[in-house]
Image: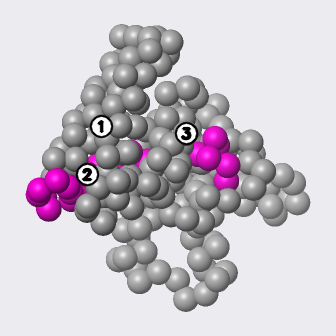
Amino acid sequence: MDYAGFLHADRWRPYEVYDVLHRQLCHAHPRRDFQGAIDRGGEAGRLGGWLLAESDRMFHVWHVFQRGEMTRAEMIRAMRPIQMRWARALTHAADGPDRKLRALGRDLLRQWPALWTFVFVEGVEPTNNDAERAMRPAVLWRKNSFGTWSDAGSTFVARMQTVVETARRRGVNALDWLQQACRAADLGIAPPPLLSG
């Protein structure tokens, strides 16, 4: 599928319509799988521990970069040995006896470039935690209100929640903007831009 930006996603198969070079796999998801392997013990536990340790190293370098204590070029250099160890560990997992870890290893190797987009592309992060935090109010609203009863209601709620979250991120008073947008609709003109003044 033709897409100019970068899609941050888990490993759900439908996302694979987007080119692997335009995706970033969320690193929080495999960390849970690595911990699951540790909990199973044996060879799976050993490999899971190895992978979790490399994930910790990766996040350490990322956090140093985020704090401005290294440049992107320095981060890229620091990530190279970590990537090599990840590749070795995932190859062992893909050939190992643990069914779940074997499937995980093969899947992550198959989508390898999407694990590392954040290293090279400005604005991409290793997890989709920011997006999940942004969606949390909507998820809680749906849970507490039992959702909507129609497609039109779902569309309305999705659009309103998008406006409110966008306004919050841009420092705009959502209620003021909505009032201006309603006035503009009454006058048959375009709504104001959703930008802070």
Q: Which amino acid lies under the numbered mark 1 shown in the image of this protein?
A: Ser
Of residue 74 and residue 164, the one placed in the foreground of this image is: 74
Kindly identify which residue carries mark 3: 113
The picture places residue 137, in percent across and down from the top left corner, at 40, 61
State how far apart marks 1 and 2 are (Cα): 9 Å
Which residues make up the magenta segment?
A: 18-44
Relative placement, left or right, of 195 versus 60 is right
**Picture layout, residue 75 above or below residue 12:** above
Q: Inspect this view and state whether residue 160 appears.
A: no
Q: What element carries label 2?
A: helix
Relative placement, left or right, of 81 versus 190 is left
Of residue 163 and residue 116, the one placed in the foreground of this image is: 116
Mostly what secondary structure, the magenta segment? helix
Residue drawn 68% across the image and 41% down it: 5
Does residue 2 belong to the magenta stretch? Answer: no
Of residue 193 and residue 27, the one placed in the foreground of this image is: 27
State how far apart marks 3 and 2 are (Cα): 19 Å
Which mark is first along the chain, 2 or 3?
Answer: 2
Which mark is first along the chain, 1 or 3?
Answer: 1
Kindly identify which residue carries mark 1: 55
Kindly identify which residue carries mark 2: 34
Residue drawn 26% across the image and 61% down it: 97
Residue drawn 53% across the image and 48% down it: 111
